[in-house]
Amino acid sequence: MMPVLSAMLATFYLRTTVETVAFTGAETQIETVEAEVTGQGRRWVYVRTDHDARTLRIRADSDLRAQLDPLRAPGRDCLRIRVETGRWGIRRTLIPALFDRAFGTDHLVPCSTRRDAEAQ
């Protein structure tokens, strides 16, 4: 049990250290990208910015969740999210925290055809 806990803590601290060094005091670039909606839950929407990226969970309001249909129409809906690039090309997404306002329909956009061309 102890080696597993140690490995989990070491991973967390390493990730926190790398993020701190990559973004603190650095000249960062913030861009808005389309993140494809891959699923949804009771309060959450699951998105991916790239095919290689991990899935992110974003809190969404009921109006936005009512307009999404990721299972019947995959690749149709995208959300505009901000991505910050720091030192060494490390990227992080800027999504609402727990007590921030949830994403609404103002972030919803149809996925561009450019994403379809990248997948092929």
Image (cartoon, rainbow, N blue to C red):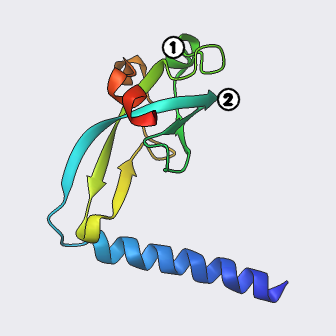
Residue bearing the label numbered 1: 63
> Is residue 79 visible from the viewing direction of this image?
no
Q: Residue 116: which quarter of the image?
A: top left
Which quadrant does the C terminus fall into?
top left
Q: Are marks 2 and 1 in contact (CB under 8 Å)?
A: no
Q: Secondary structure at mark 1?
A: helix
Q: In the rendered image, which quarter is residue 89 located in?
A: bottom left
The amino acid sitting under disc 1 is Asp
Q: Residue at x 34, y 58 (%)?
A: 91
Q: Amino acid at mark 2?
A: Gly
Residue 33 - label: none
Instruction: Residue 28: give x, y in percent of width and height.
Output: 19, 60
Q: Quadrant of residue 105?
A: top left
* Residue placed under numbered mark 2 in the picture: 41
Q: Answer left or right for 94 relative to 32.
A: right
User: Looking at the image, which residue sits at the far front?
Assistant: 120
